[in-house]
Image (cartoon, rainbow, N blue to C red):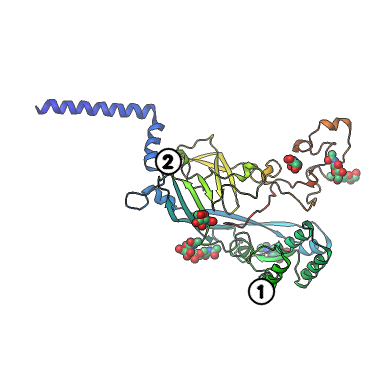
Amino acid sequence: MRCPTLVFLLIVNCIFLLTGLILLVAFPNWIVNKIAAKVMYIHEDGTGKSSFVTDYWERLPAVHIFKFYMFNITNPDDVMFHGHEPILQELGPYTYEMTEVKENIRYSKDGNLVSYRANKTWVFNPQKSCATCRCEDQVAFPNLVFTALIYYARTEKINIFYRRILDIFILIMRSKPIQNVGVCDILLNSYKDPIIEVIHTPIYKTLKKTLKLTTPDFPDLGYLPKYNRTGDGDFVVMTGKDDIANIGQIVSWNNWTELPWWNTPESRRFKGSGDGINQKPGIGKHDKYEMYQPLACRKFTLEYSGSEAHVNGIPALAYSFVGDSYDGVRNIGYRYENYEKMNYYPGWPCGLNHTVEVTPRCKNVKCDLFENWCDKCCNGSFINETWVLPPGIIPLRCQPGE
Ligand SMILES: *[C@@H]1O[C@H](CO)[C@@H](O)[C@H](O)[C@H]1NC(C)=O
Ligand SMILES: *[C@@H]1O[C@H](CO)[C@@H](O)[C@H](O)[C@H]1NC(C)=O
Ligand SMILES: *[C@@H]1O[C@H](CO)[C@@H](O)[C@H](O)[C@H]1NC(C)=O
Ligand SMILES: *[C@@H]1O[C@H](CO)[C@@H](O)[C@H](O)[C@H]1NC(C)=O
Ligand SMILES: *[C@@H]1O[C@H](CO)[C@@H](O)[C@H](O)[C@H]1NC(C)=O
Ligand SMILES: *[C@@H]1O[C@H](CO)[C@@H](O)[C@H](O)[C@H]1NC(C)=O
Ligand SMILES: *[C@@H]1O[C@H](CO)[C@@H](O)[C@H](O)[C@H]1NC(C)=O
């Protein structure tokens, strides 16, 4: 009795093993993806705790490294008093390590969506910064408040009386176009400004109400002021339960589904981008990856950079930002409107001697295409009644986490 049973079981085992092997050899990705789909999606186990893989998503056991470079104006007096061009000295990297913990995690009833807030801790790392880089380094830096006031006076239609008051106010406050500020104060800590102090006094607040002034309510200055250990917005993302290819894709941020401050539907859309931690399994060299960064108030598109590696035996592909990420010329979505109509880069892109000669041929030359800007028919970067700024210069549009 026993012997035939054993043989029978062996045969069945063999059949299973063979089928398994054939499937694995013939459709390796299919099998791996099926397994991935079962364990990889963001979910809790039965007891209300995050599953093993989801725990990594919640508190990634790795640091994000951010390198900041500053441009120091080395001739501030010549710029302010003699109208010289600024001479810039690049400093950096000033390196911060960021770790992220997801908090307030809540799943939708069907388990297809999850909402959370990312709590980010930033730590300055002098070892990973340049040899001479210190948090306390002082740089001569454009005075943001002064610039904002001048911009306001130029672009808003305010009457001459208020304009005079504004001028006198700037003089009394000794506000200058360039000021010295500590690097870490500009980046993560924040710094104070006398004018900002004034607009947060009770007297000014009363004045603001009666005169219906529209000054913004930011008590702290800097790029990422007091950003450490704060949440940068409430996210709703897909868990990948219904389709693992959607894992980590953002559905909304701060209840918004698009970013109102950019110029084109494509640049406003961030739905479907990830936070840089998850991507669909089996991402390949031809796939693009979109990453939303609340600190820059925009998404970035990444593509395969051409380098690959093995990390602990696991094949890895490196991705980097696509070339036009900071190019407002090719990517109109991020173009600065230049409402103040200043020609900031007079020699760009045609040199200082570019002249316009209108001939009959010009009817067929499309002057809004970059290729034609320096044609005799076109006005260089003067498009739509204002000057376009070169690649690399794009506006900052919000306070992080706004
Ligand atoms: C920045 O430039 C100023 C001159 O404007 C100089 O005194 C200062 O040392 C420079 N800062 C750094 C960090 O090199
Ligand atoms: C952020 O907070 C952590 C913990 O309190 C601290 O160690 C770190 O130095 C802070 N980072 C900054 C940039 O202030
Ligand atoms: C982030 O975490 C720190 C430390 O746990 C906590 O003090 C802080 O309140 C948290 N921030 C937010 C916005 O929840
Ligand atoms: C988003 O909407 C929900 C429900 O209406 C609300 O509780 C939450 O505070 C909102 N979040 C933000 C950041 O506005
Ligand atoms: C512009 O023209 C002037 C005078 O003809 C000449 O001296 C100068 O070198 C030219 N500059 C450029 C950048 O071509
Ligand atoms: C110029 O302005 C028009 C109308 O506002 C707009 O449709 C067009 O896209 C603009 N062209 C460029 C190159 O920005
Ligand atoms: C070039 O700019 C001038 C004003 O600076 C404007 O009058 C003229 O129409 C522009 N020409 C073209 C072809 O855009």
Residue at horizontal 72 percent and vertical 69 percent from the top:
210
Q: Where is residue 360, by image quadrant?
A: top right
Residue 312 visible, this orientation: yes
Side (left or right) of 119 relative to 20: right
User: What separation in Å lies between label 2 and label 1 (alpha carbons)?
Assistant: 60 Å
- Looking at the rendering, which quadrant does residue 244 occupy? top left
Q: Which residue is mark 1?
A: 202
For label 2, the residue is: 314
User: Is mark 2 in CB contact (under 8 Å) with mark 1?
Assistant: no
Looking at the image, residue 168 lies above or below residue 295: below
> The N terminus appears in which quarter of the rendering?
top left
Reply above or below: 194 against 29.
below
Classify mark 1 as within 8 Å of ligand 3 or not, answering yes or no. no
Q: Residue at x 54, y 59 (%)?
A: 127
Q: Quadrant of residue 214?
A: bottom right
Query: Which numbered disc covers residue 139?
Result: none
Q: Nearer the viewer, residue 322 or 127?
A: 322
Residue at the outermost left position: 1
Specify which label sits upstream in the sequence, 2 or 1.
1
Q: Is mark 2 within 8 Å of ligand 3?
A: no
Q: Considering depth in this image, is 379 or 163 the residue closer to the camera?
A: 163
Question: Of the residues shown, which amino acid type is indicated by label 2?
Answer: Ile
Residue 396: x %, y % from top left: 66, 54
Q: Quadrant of ligand 6?
A: top right
Residue farthest bottom in this picture: 203
Where is residue 301 drawn, in percent x and y?
58, 42
Task: Tell me the kind of residue under disc 1.
Answer: Pro
Callout 2: SS = strand
The residue mark sitting in front, 2 or 1, is: 1
| Labels in figure, total | 2
Name the residue at 82% across, 44% down: 351
Residue 98 can be seen in this image? no
